[in-house]
Image (cartoon, rainbow, N blue to C red):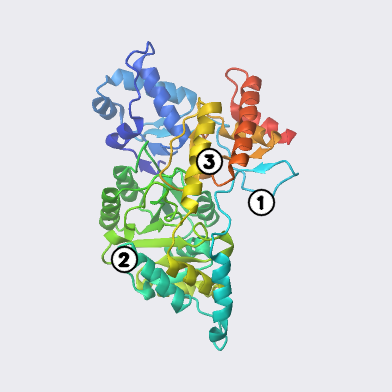
Amino acid sequence: MSTSFLRPPSLLRLLGAWRAQDSAEPAYRQLAQALRMLVLDGRIGLNVRLPGERELAAALGLSRTTIAAAFDRLRDEGYLESRQGSGSVTRLPPGRVETPTPDIDGVTGDNLLNWTHAALPAAPGVGLAYAHAVEALPAYLGDLGYDPLGLPVLRRAIAAHYERRGCPTDPDQIMITNGAQQGFSLLLQWLAGPGDRAVIDHPTYHNAIQALQRANVVPVPVGLPVHGWDIDAMDAAFRQTAPRFAYIIADFHNPTGRSMDPATRRALVAVAMRTHTPLVIDETMVAMGLDGSPPPPVACHDPSGRHVITLGSASKIFWGGLRVGWIRADPQTVAALGRIRTTMDMASPVVEQIAVAKLMDADEGLGPRAAMLRDRRDHLLAQLEQHLPHWRVESPAGGLSLWAELPRAEASALAALAGNHGVRIAAGPRFGVNGAFERFLRLPFTLPQAQLDMGVARLVEADARLHARTPRGRDPLALALEADRLI
């Protein structure tokens, strides 16, 4: 059974300029190829019902015979399944679905470059903030040190941070967590249970997908179009699948780097309010702007505070070792989450909370590190354009990585071969469900330029070897399995 229905306007936005007018290729083959790539890229999820032949023919200005021929071709290839009365539902051919391999920290040998982590070393001022926290610690030692909602000094600092961004917030709307990942786990327990659905933008943060799957919550992917977000498709997914919540990365999206504009934020909240779908907005990347700051928070468009829940973190902006995150929600939700939290752990470490409060009060953002990241981003883009010109890579306005599009669906195969050439990379399927995004890689630009050069050089070698060894028509995923046996 399909989990959602893709309406013609959303499908047309995803298709874009799909037809080459000067091509000798018949229209039905071009359309089948375009739809096939949308499924492989994950922009159209699996188990999604496409518009009917008559409806799609009218939307595209084509004959129904052309649409039927394109659908027949996709059915023959295994990308569509049609049943009487149920329409045509997207599928993947047998053998195409592959479960992404999770990251393994550390390196194997001295010469393996781990290019999978999109994170930075500690920011300037972290050491001083810890020194301040240690000096301030005696004032807290007379207390028990257990506060499931967090230290008041940090909750005030985070509330002030939202105030400066144009989103009035009271400290009782803030709960401190052990990183944003714990915050998401708490929200999963509170909002959903096994068998429930959650809408996600697609691709998305791989740890969020894994958390949903561990909790047996069914992710409902809504594909990102070439630019921005498809609010009509979100609206359809909310109404058709009755999700318990939607998880969205609106600011310097991981992995694509895009940022949601103010009008889209307003429209997203309006759809959520109309369909009674809570929004969980992940703001862990919000401070990673390289070409300007993001708009005010999505929560600004929710005056009641009952429809938007925001996740934040100190990990990206200050240091991953701090392990301090937060949830912004209405006071009743914060109190409920605090009660759930006591079944997991009692509180976050006091010293880290004091240190983050000091850093938040300074509110220096990326500071001089922004120029460093811009230089590394631009350097990596130039290296890829020079050495891998057949890849398509756009410059993101922020974030910590590039989302590179390959000409063919071979990301897993390339990632497997890259290990043999001394570089570990994150293939696109890690950021999707059901084997999507085989034409994409995430390439962080957080490493020094010399290491970025080394990573590109090794990718060039792996790319050349992949195409030298792949016979025409052979599935690259079969090569990935073969390469795994060699590593």
Amino acid carrying mark 1 in the image: Asp
Q: Which residue is pictured at 53% across the width and 55% down the height?
A: 211
Residue 425 can be seen in this image: no
Circles 3 and 2: CB atoms closer than 8 Å = no
- Tell which tag, 2 or 1, sits nearer the viewer: 1
SS for callout 3: strand
Place of residue 58 in the rendered image (x, y in percent of width and height, measured from the top left): 24, 26
Q: Residue at x 54, y 80 (%)?
A: 136
Q: Please state which amino acid type lies under the numbered disc 3.
A: Arg
C-alpha separation, residue under disc 1 versus residue under disc 3? 17 Å
Q: Is residue 176 left or right of residue 4?
A: right
Q: Position of residue 107 (x, y in %)?
A: 70, 47
Residue under label 1: 105
Q: What element does badge 2 sit on? A: loop
Q: Which residue is mark 2?
A: 306
Instruction: Please name which of the two marks, 3 or 2, marks the residue nearer to the observer.
Output: 3
Residue 442 is marked as 3
